[in-house]
Amino acid sequence: MDWDSILKAYPNDTAAILGIRSLREKVDAVMAGLTIPLIEAPCREMDDFNPFLQVFAPICSALWKEISGVDPTFDMTGVLKAFIADSPIPEIPESEHDLAEAVMNAVISRFLHLLREKNPGLVPEEWSKGTCPFCGAFPKIGFDAEDKRTLACLSCGHTWRFPRVTCFVCGTTDHTAMGYFDAEGVDGVKVYFCRSCGHYIKIVDSRVRIVNDPETEDALTLVMDSLAEQEGFVAAE
Ligand SMILES: [Zn+2]
Ligand SMILES: [Zn+2]
């Protein structure tokens, strides 16, 4: 993550960005002492995460206390389960939702990055789907080079090759259903959309733009997400 580029791009959001950076640093510090297990299969389904809930819960609780000053008043394991399943989390008051999501996201994502690095052999060499072969998440961003397009998973950091002519969500190859647009002032980034399923993805052209890591590129191109949403498209989840 290139924090300097992000701080420069959003001068009015300095406090929020520094808050996220600080959370990430706390997560990194806690995770540094963790033994990352060898696993037998990727974590593409919700149940695959069950063995790790006992690992995530105390880390999330400790971070919660460090940031908010008090112990969580809810059962962190249950909340994590709901969060991973993308279910509503009624146990947490509305005012604390953002913090809870930020903490859980940061912990799970860092763990998945470490887990993938520790278990590199689990990702198949050939993968034709639009979801991440390691953690099952949909990509939000991809990269075009001269000879190929790669999609990037922001959850675990894996990237994989994917055909330009196929929708990464519904799989259609109907070129009349797919299109793209760009925006003035944002060089080398296009929103590719699919009218069949209504989803979009941001594609960064590495031939045109000096490319940072996927997370930084995602953060630097948030205006493209707003434009895509204004056009009625949604990011895949
Ligand atoms: Zn992934
Ligand atoms: Zn589609």
Image (cartoon, rainbow, N blue to C red):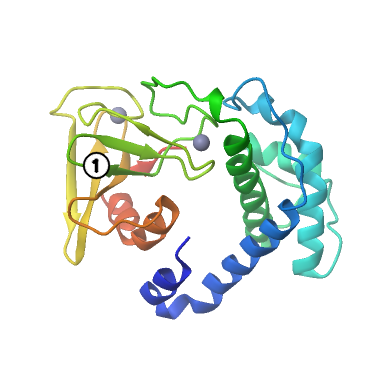
In terms of depth relative to the viewer, which is nearer, 171 or 109?
109
Relative to 146, residue 47 above or below = above
- Provide residue 152's location: percent of width, then percent of height: 40, 41
Quick one: label 1, few (<14), some, or many (20+) residues within 10 Å?
Answer: many
Rendering quarter of residue 125: top left
Rendered location of residue 218, percent (x, y): 39, 54
Measuring 62% from the left and 56% from the top, which residue is drawn there?
102
Is label 1 in a helix, a strand or a loop?
A: strand
Judge by depth and name the residue closer to the eye, 88 or 225: 225
Image quadrant in which you'd find residue 222? bottom left
Who's the residue at 45% across and 40% down the image?
153
The residue beneath circle 1 is 192
**Relative to the observer, which residue lies in front, 21 or 11?**
21
Q: How many marks?
A: 1
> Up-down: is 234 above or below 18?
above
Q: From the viewer's perspective, is 29 left or right of 127?
A: right
User: Under 8 Å from ligand 2: the CB of mark 1?
Assistant: no
Q: Is residue 236 above or below residue 16?
A: above
At which x and y percent is residue 62?
A: 81, 58
Asked if residue 229 lies left or right of residue 30, the reply is: left
Residue 132 in the image: state x and y as whole percent. 46, 31
